[in-house]
């Protein structure tokens, strides 16, 4: 790039306006209830917001789809959105990276068609770091920033793991080496332009929604440190965690979060997209939260924990019988009941209490009062859905061999888990879908 171009760019008073969003999970259902109305409303809002905010670029940081084999309707919704976005804003740059829910090959399949329209889809880690670079331009087609688009990293993307002698985690060292290589190449290619880096990962110190976000890269012990992203990154756009948040107190390292609650634990999140204004590499960018309107409410009874049947039924009967907004827009309702003994009529009683209420019962959960003793001393089965696979692996290893697994065996376990989770998402009818 000519030095004259660089001087004109760095003194341009109009910042590049980038909209960061993530974790759409197109095709997701909530305990069997489709969420098409929410996705349709969000994407319509996103189109209008890009116009209202005069956006130059859109960045989507992974988990575009909820499963590796998304329904045709979800794929159609994505491509319909992209077509509308480009018709309304022909100069718009769009960058989409793959997340742990996405099939990288499926996401990248239309890349040859989309790329000429300034829509870049990077589902898997490219072999050549140059293929992860996307130049963002303004309305006059002048280069204004460079995106180093790193998608979700799978175990196969990392160099061979070796046991670290100084106590460092070899898996984190592997991730760091990937980012070091890609960011170094991007920094050189940017030639002084602002550098934006993406990731779909779990960062240390961030808040995880246990019910809807699967831990990636082996669990909490593999949460990535913030210094993987150097300070000269103008903005770090993250996906995977559904709660919008900063990382390590850095204003310019952000999770955009999901556009609406994907589980009951997320009902109080302030869902948003992020407007990022970038001037030049020497000046800090500014980040503004744009709240996403919620079209469907999420009710939990009781609000936390579990309650006896009589308490729950009273709360259900006290729900207001408001005008019915229509089947697709009725609030979701989750009910958690504590029982001293099995109650065969519980579901019937709950449904009777809701007979005239315009809500959708998406989940009725039961907790039994017990002694808290080990499984061998009780008649109750453990909650299998709540077991963490890595914790089970570590306990089984300790029981068989004493101590903790070494790096090689952890690596093998993580590869196996990735294969199993990918198979479950690719064939949701044959196995219960992972929550995230």
Image (cartoon, rainbow, N blue to C red):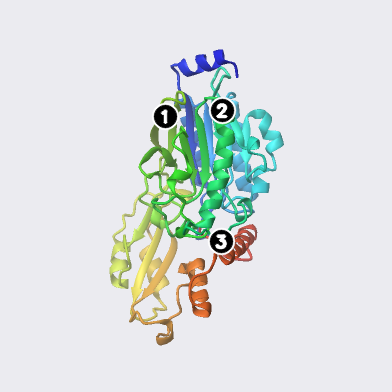
Mark nearer the N terminus (1 vs 3): 1
Q: Residue furthest right?
A: 112
CB-based contact (under 8 Å), mark 2 and mark 1? no
Is 314 situated above or below 145?
A: below
Viewer-proximal residue, 295 or 205?
205
Point out residue 353 in the picture as x, y percentages from the top left corner. 35, 65
Question: CA–CA distance between discs 3 and 2?
Answer: 41 Å
Crowd around label 2: few <14 · some 14–19 · many ≥20 (10 Å) = many
Q: Is residue 80 above or below residue 404?
A: above
Label 3 Cα crowd, 10 Å radius (few <14 / some 14-19 / many 20+): some
Dividing the picture into quadrants, the one containing residue 191 is: top right
**Residue at 40% across / 85% down in the picture?**
378
Q: Nearer the viewer, mark 3 or mark 2?
A: 2
For this rendering, which residue is in front, 163 or 371? 163
Q: Is residue 45 visible?
A: no
CA distance separating discs 1 and 3: 39 Å
Disc 1: which residue: 285
Which residue is denoted by mark 3 in the rendering?
A: 433
How dense is the environment of label 1, judged by Cα within 10 Å: few (below 14), some, or many (20 and up)?
Answer: some
Using the rendered view, name the quadrant where residue 52 is placed: top left
Residue 420 on image: x %, y %: 61, 63
Mark 2 highlights which residue? 190
Instruction: Give residue 143's quadrant in the image.
Output: top right
Residue 14 visible: yes
User: Please, what secondary structure does the residue beneath circle 2 have?
Assistant: helix
Q: Earlier in the sequence, mark 2 or mark 1?
A: 2
């Amino acid at each position: 790039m000519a030095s004259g171009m660089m001087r004109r760019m760095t003194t341009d008073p109009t910042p590049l306006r980038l909209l960061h969003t993530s974790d759409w999970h197109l095709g997701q259902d909530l305990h069997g209830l489709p969420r098409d109305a929410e996705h349709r409303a969000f994407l319509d809002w996103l189109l209008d917001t890009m116009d209202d905010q005069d956006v130059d670029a859109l960045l989507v940081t992974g988990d575009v789809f909820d499963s590796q084999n998304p329904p045709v309707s979800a794929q159609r919704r994505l491509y319909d959105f992209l077509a509308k976005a480009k018709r309304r804003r022909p100069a718009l740059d769009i960058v989409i990276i793959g997340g742990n829910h996405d099939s990288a090959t499926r996401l990248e399949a239309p890349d040859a068609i989309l790329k000429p329209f300034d829509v870049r889809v990077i589902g898997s880690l490219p072999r050549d770091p140059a293929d992860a670079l996307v130049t963002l331009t303004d309305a006059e087609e002048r280069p204004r920033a460079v995106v180093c688009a790193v998608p979700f990293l799978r175990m196969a993307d990392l160099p061979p793991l070796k046991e670290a002698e100084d106590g460092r985690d070899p898996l984190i060292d592997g991730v760091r080496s990937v980012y070091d290589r890609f960011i170094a190449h991007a920094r050189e290619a940017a030639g002084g332009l602002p550098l934006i880096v993406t990731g779909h990962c779990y960062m240390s110190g961030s808040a995880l929604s246990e019910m809807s976000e699967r831990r990636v890269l082996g669990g909490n012990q593999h949460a990535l440190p913030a210094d993987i992203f150097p300070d000269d990154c103008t903005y770090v756009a993250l996906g995977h965690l559904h709660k919008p948040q900063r990382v390590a107190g850095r204003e310019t390292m952000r999770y955009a979060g999901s556009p609406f609650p994907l589980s009951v634990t997320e009902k109080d999140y302030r869902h948003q997209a992020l407007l990022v204004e970038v001037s030049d590499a020497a000046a800090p960018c500014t980040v503004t939260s744009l709240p996403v309107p919620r079209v469907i409410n999420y009710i939990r009874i009781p609000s936390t924990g579990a309650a006896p049947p009589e308490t729950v039924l009273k709360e259900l009967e006290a729900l207001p019988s408001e005008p019915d907004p229509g089947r697709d827009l009725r609030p979701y309702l989750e009910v958690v009941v504590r029982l001293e003994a099995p109650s065969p009529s519980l579901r019937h009683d709950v449904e009777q209490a809701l007979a005239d209420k315009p809500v959708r019962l998406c989940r009725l959960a039961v907790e039994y009062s017990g002694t808290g003793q080990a499984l061998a001393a009780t008649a109750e089965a453990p909650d299998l859905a709540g077991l963490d696979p890595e914790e089970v692996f570590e306990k089984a290893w300790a029981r068989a061999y004493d101590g903790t697994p070494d790096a090689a065996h952890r690596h093998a376990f993580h590869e196996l888990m990735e294969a199993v989770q990918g198979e479950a998402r690719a064939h949701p009818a044959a196995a219960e879908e992972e929550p995230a």
